[in-house]
Amino acid sequence: MGGHLVTARRRVLLDLIRGAGGHVDAKELYRRATSQGESISLATVYRGLRLFKALGLVDERRLGQLGCYYEIRRPVDHQHLVCQGCGKVIEFQSPLMRRLIDQVQHDHNFSVAKTELYLQGYCQECKWQTEDSGR
Amino acid sequence: MGGHLVTARRRVLLDLIRGAGGHVDAKELYRRATSQGESISLATVYRGLRLFKALGLVDERRLGQLGCYYEIRRPVDHQHLVCQGCGKVIEFQSPLMRRLIDQVQHDHNFSVAKTELYLQGYCQECKWQTEDSGR
DNA sequence: TTAAGTGCAAAGGCTTTGCAGCATA
DNA sequence: TATGCTGCAAAGCCTTTGCACTTAA
């Protein structure tokens, strides 16, 4: 059973994902790596991300139509709130989520392995603007 | 302000979406249309879907890594449960969802416009199999 | 030394678009 | 008739892959 190598690219990649605090996609990681002088190809970024996912180090999230974003896996589950005005991403977590999942598992005799709640709308600042413009 | 035409293709397309009970993607709609003798192109399918979305007739859902699925918009919100064993899609709805959204809106001063909860796991039948195989 | 990682370019899905012709109101 | 619809083929994204070369252990 072959192990996985610790390479320079992978270290850089993982550091970048950590530093990004979630909310980066593959292309952005590639851009950040190269812009700080690191030599890496987009293909390697994708391969690294796939590996990290498989190892459970990183989670891939689909934020609506925005595409795939990557973040370090953390012990406590959280969900995302995306502002369609300014694009801001807010993380939150609610105990109701746990209750909801328990309920669904029970009602449908289903074993839930992965959950993703995505909420889209307008943040405090962008709310005013939509009200003003009346759009 | 131009109106939108009611055309044969669009009628067919909408009927197919209705008949599918959710859970079809563009390619599948194209396949079903042509296989029942209708003449339509994939581009027209996409254009129709975009229009229906804009008119609020149809919702686009991203079921995890499965891609885009389309369904007739219904008055009552619902969410999806996808079995990673057999691919079955189960719809459900829970009053906890409403409460969770109210809470998030309040806590983050955010106005939620669109919500999507996606749960992935194993249904009743597929649960046994994963237990047996011990995988 | 040797399995694993990497870059490059090509290929694969899915979705959109430009354009010329067609159809609906 | 005029605006909007359609098909076709091409192009655009994002992501994966084949292959030859490089590197970590």
Image: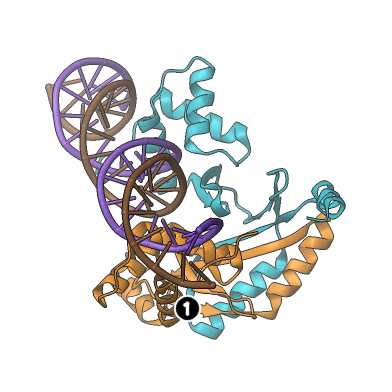
Chain colours: A orange, B cyan, C purple, D brown
The location of residue A126, given as percent across then percent down, is 35, 76
Q: Give the chain of mark 1.
A: A
Quadrant for residue D2, please give it: top left
Decide: is C14 above or below D24.
Answer: above
Residue at 63 percent across and 38 percent down: it is B21
Residue at 68 percent across and 44 percent down: it is B87
Q: Which residue is mark 1?
A: A90
Lateral position of residue C16 relative to residue B65, left or right: left
Residue at 41 percent across and 33 percent down: it is B45
Quadrant for residue A1, please give it: bottom right
Lateral position of residue D1 relative to residue B61, left or right: left
The location of residue A125, given as percent across then percent down, is 36, 81
Specify the quadrant that holds the N terminus of chain B. Answer: top left
The location of residue B71, given as percent across then percent down, is 56, 43
Lateral position of residue A56 relative to residue A28, left or right: right
Residue at 48 percent across and 33 percent down: it is B27
The location of residue D10, given as percent across then percent down, is 21, 32
Circle 1 SS class: strand
Q: Residues within 10 Å of mark 1 (few under 14, many from 20)?
A: some
Decide: is B43 above or below A21.
Answer: above
Instruction: Find the residue positioned furthest to the bottom.
Output: B107
